[in-house]
Image (cartoon, coloured by chain):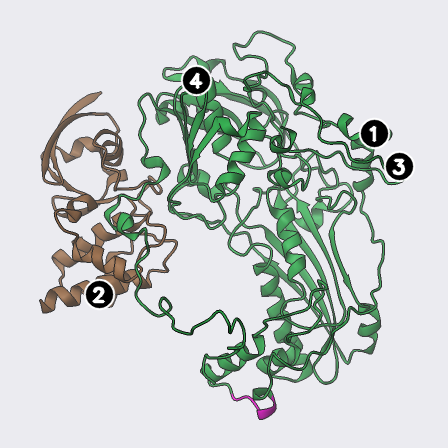
Chain colours: A brown, B green
Amino acid sequence: MTTPVHFTHNGRPVSLFTEAGESLLSLLRLKLGDQTPKYGCGQGGCGACSVRIDGQLRLACLTLAETVDGAEVETVAALSAPNLDPLQEAFMDHFAAQCGYCTPGMIVAARTLLDTNPRPSRDEVIEAISGNLCRCTGYEPIIDAILAVAAQEVSA
Amino acid sequence: MSLDFRKDLFADERDDNLNVVGKPIRRQDILGHVTGTSPFFDDNKFDNLLHLKCVRSPHHHARIVSIDTAKAEAMPGVVRLLRGRDVPVNLNTLLSLLDFGLDDEPVLAETKVSYWGEPIVAVIATSEQAALDAVAAVEVRYEELPAVFDVEEALKPGAPTVNETYPGNHFVFYENTDHQRLRFGDTEARFARAAHIVEGRYQLTPIEQAPMEPNGAIAAPETNDRFACYTPTQGLFFSVGTCAKVLDVDLNRLHFIGGTVGGGFGGKVDSVCEPLAILGAMLTRQPVRYVLNRAEEMQVSAPRSAELWEIKDGIAEDGRILAREFKGWFDAGAYTRLTSYGVVKCTGHLPGPYTIPAVKSDIWCVFTNRTPATAMRGFGVLGVDFAIERQMDKGARAAGLGPMEYRLINAYRDGDMKATRRVASNTALVECIQVAAEKAGYPLAPEYKAMTSMTGASLTQIPETVTDSGRRPAGYTAIEKTEVSPGLGEAAQVQPTPAAPVARARTGGASSLPERPSYAPQPAPPQAAPPPAPEPPEPAPAKPRYSRYSSSIRRR
């Protein structure tokens, strides 16, 4: 069954049709051409497809596309324009990405944390990215990058 | 001691002005990573993209009795199915590109399956879901066979034959031995003189690479009768060569586009997805996407092999290791992939970074009904290093020495003859241990602190070495009998079983599937190809030879 959905994608209103059972991840990647959320597991286990729906951290692979009707959907692409998010700069400076596959989801999760908790403790950072798997870095550079941004944003 | 040691090494090349180490340098590709714009293979989009999924074995070991695809073929969205007979050369071993090993693994199983999850039929459909639905509708009847999952069990007489190419369940090295051997010095004589004998048995589990990006490939027809393949492969030219061989096409008809690898760790060198994606694109003339889902990635993609080790050391009163013997078993799973290479690499690594005047090693590459193993971060050396270092700790206790002191006594020095008959140079293990001891607050006595890698070479010549012919377990002679035809020249020794189209030609004509086709511009079945340059005839046919398979690169 085909259902129309209207939502904002990274601030831009979009209207398109979704098939029954189609995931938001599939809709974003295949129909909207936003390749920044990644498929890692398709079952909510890895966080590579993390996006924000109305400001809340969500997994695009487990979200039915038709449920985002009327919502604001943001991917990491929203953070990059017009200027890079401080988190993106910090990830680059702290070597917080190697293969880069988990990075878009990781940054979305980190941004969501800092928006709601600008001064997270190290444990809170770990908790916030615990749903995002990374196989390359060992997480430490990622945690350092997020803490560096928190310190910088609070002092600014 | 500081970390500044062995500055003599590469002295003329270094300026000691480190401009990367310890400094925050950005990766050249990291802007793409943090903005999500790095081009992974699955980010490429195509019109009319088709999706490929495989029917996989639900058994560890079974004969395929029948395959009924009628229901699946009639399902909505299904474009076509691929069977083993559609693959021009449906038997391959990855290292045949290096002329190492016999072709032993089908792209799609035809007569039997040897591991859980082995692909049998590929379904190509207009959506992933349609492909999965059709996969579920393919009816395969199996006759289950006894399976073996343990390397020692697999080598016992009467064990089920896992891999028909190797009836003894072991790889055959250099066409004449059932295992990889190393002989250096006389271990028995030195064991007899040893003050302590230490023995250990060590086991390592397989490890899945688990990259965040699942393995896969997308193939698409190009103009000029070429096919593009977007792939996350870690070995792009290796993968091109493998696909050219399996699909029996010239290399220049394949246009491989690699790029960002979403984590590899060795798991993306096997070229398991590329051949089927390209074959699908060839037969449908549409882009075909074949991507493993997470369950397939975890269960079916090849891990690092399990290993079993037995090590025996003979140690002198003063703590010097006089002799060391290894017995090792690598679990290749059902097919060779890269495990045979891992064994060779391992042997070159023995006996670890220590100078030992007598070393003996026997390592088997064993076939079992487990998932085929392949490259994974340090495969071939990491496992034996674990065993060696555990053995070093045991040896230290037996000799009444601390673990650092025992290693310092035995560490190799510049000028030492290694078991591989190369002279050690640029060694720095002694200094590394000294720094590690200092950083760990481990007190070393002055004589140990005074040690250096630059002096103290204790063994500069290859010792008189005891050789033996070794035992060849059952199965080895069986391979010789079935595969060697005395009197036939190299050119006549074509692949014994499946790859020759004649041997696979279907007798019935009911299916809509074509005869096993050749996708080369001029149809050229393998046996009609020009033979490889014949080797000079052997003077005496005393020692039967294996038939050798050349890759399509060599053949053309």
Name the residue carrying label 2.
Answer: A147
Q: Are marks 2 and 1 in contact (CB under 8 Å)?
A: no
**CA gap, disc 3 to disc 4?**
49 Å
Q: Is residue A46 among what the camera can see?
A: yes
Q: Secondary structure at mark 2?
A: helix
Compared with residue B159, is residue B549 higher up or lower down, i.e. above or below?
above
Which circle, 1 or 3, is nearer the viewer?
Answer: 3
Instruction: Identify the amino acid type marked 2.
Output: Leu
Q: Residue at x 63, y 13 (%)?
A: B506
Q: Most prominent secondary structure in the magenta stretch?
A: loop
Instruction: Identify the amino acid type marked 3.
Output: Pro
Name the residue carrying label 1.
Answer: B485
Name the residue carrying label 3.
Answer: B541
Q: Are marks 1 and 3 in contact (CB under 8 Å)?
A: no
Which circle, 2 or 1, is nearer the viewer?
Answer: 1
- In which quadrant of the rendered image does the C terminus of chain B lie? top right
**CA gap, disc 2 to disc 1?**
70 Å
Q: Secondary structure at mark 4?
A: helix
Looking at the rendering, which quadrant does residue B508 occupy?
top right
Same chain, labels 2 and 3:
no
Compared with residue B511, is residue B10 higher up or lower down, i.e. above or below?
below
Name the residue carrying label 4.
Answer: B284
Chain assignment, label 2: A
